[in-house]
Amino acid sequence: GKGLGTRFLRHIERNSMLLFMISCDSPDIDAEYKVLIGELEQFNPDLLDKKRLLAITKSDMIDEELEAEIRQTLPAEVPAIFISSLTNKNITPLKDMIWKALHE
């Protein structure tokens, strides 16, 4: 991609948590996550103090076995959840995770 735009980055400075969304068909979710973290750090290192969640999207495309395999490769330092907006998979649990992160 082109990287994160400055307007977008200015916008997320106001949020108290960061939700990363990476597609399950990404060849390397961990690497993609680290690139995003690197971009945030370059823009404003304080952003890394915010709570983070990772949503793995389009997970209607994979079965439980593949999901378990992918889970092994995810960054250990961030809570992750597999979601699908197509089938509504885990959308409510994701909302709960966001709610908890915002109110801890």
Image (tube, rainbow, N blue to C red):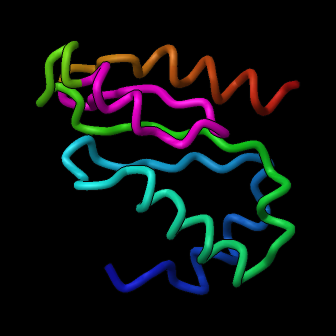
Q: Quadrant of residue 48?
A: bottom right
Q: In which quarter of the image is the N terminus?
A: bottom left
Up the image or down, 18 lies above or below 60; here it is below
- Is residue 4 shown in magenta? no
Q: x, y (%) of residue 64?
A: 22, 13
Q: In which quarter of the image is residue 3?
A: bottom left
Q: x, y (%) of residue 61?
A: 11, 30
- Is residue 75 shown in magenta? yes
Q: Which residue is drawn at 14% across and 26% down?
A: 62
Q: Residue at x 74, y 21 (%)?
A: 100
Q: Which residue is drawn at 66% across and 72% down?
A: 40
Q: Which of 87 and 65 is in front in this view?
A: 65
Up the image or down, 2 lies above or below 41; here it is below
Q: Which of 87 and 52 is in front in this view?
A: 52
Q: Quadrant of residue 38?
A: bottom right
User: How many numbered badges does the structure rendering display?
Assistant: 0
Region rendered in magenta: 67-86
Q: Quadrant of the C terminus?
A: top right
Left or right of 91: which side holds 23? left
Q: Which residue is drawn at 79% across and 78% down?
A: 44
Q: Which of 37 and 9 is in front in this view?
A: 37
Up the image or down, 21 lies above or below 8; here it is above
